[in-house]
Amino acid sequence: MRYRIEYLIETTEEETVCAVVETAADLDSVEWQARVGGVDARRRHGAGGFQIRDLEDHGRIVALETFSDPIATFSLAGATVH
């Protein structure tokens, strides 16, 4: 699998993963999947957001989004990451 979606109870803390989904889709599709799955993760686990890790890049976080805030985009080493 290429990416792992980690649903988080609290997006500012490290040890708050409450649900995990692994997928081999492209990043745009994985982000969409994370938002759709977020409805269930909020209801079942009280998730407050999610992060997506690139498993082919040592688990680097490539996306972080809270359910109360729109898409978070940040930059790493000159490359924009969603």
Image (spheres, helix red, strand yellow):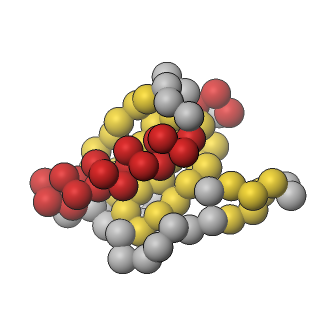
Which of the 4 quarters of the picture holds residue 48?
bottom left
Q: Where in the figure is residue 25, as x and y percent of width and height?
A: 50, 30
Which residue is found at the position 49% from the left and 25% from the top? 24
The quadrant of the picture occupied by the C terminus is: bottom right
The quarter of the displayed image where residue 38 is located: bottom left
Count of all numbered marks drawn on residues in the image: 0
Residue 62: percent from left, percent from top: 61, 49
Question: On the picture, is 24 further left or further right than 35?
Answer: right
Q: Residue furthest left?
A: 44
Q: Is residue 63 left or right of residue 66?
A: right
Identify the residue shown where x is 13% and y is 54%. 44
Is 43 displayed left or right of 64 in the figure?
left
**68 to 9, vertically: above or below:** below
Left or right of residue 27, residue 42 in this image: left
Name the residue at 81% across, 54% down.
79
> Quick one: 49 or 82, which is closer to the camera?
82
Where residue 46 appears, as percent x and y from the top left, is: 20, 63
- Residue placed furthest toward the bottom: 68
Taking the image as drawn, is residue 62 in sight? Answer: yes
Where does residue 41 sit, x and y in percent of width and height?
Answer: 23, 53
Q: Which residue in the rendered view is the most extreme toward the right? A: 78
Q: Note whether 67 is above or below 19 in the view shown.
A: below
Up-down relation of residue 24 to residue 17 (above or below): above
**Residue 6 appears anywhere in the view:** no
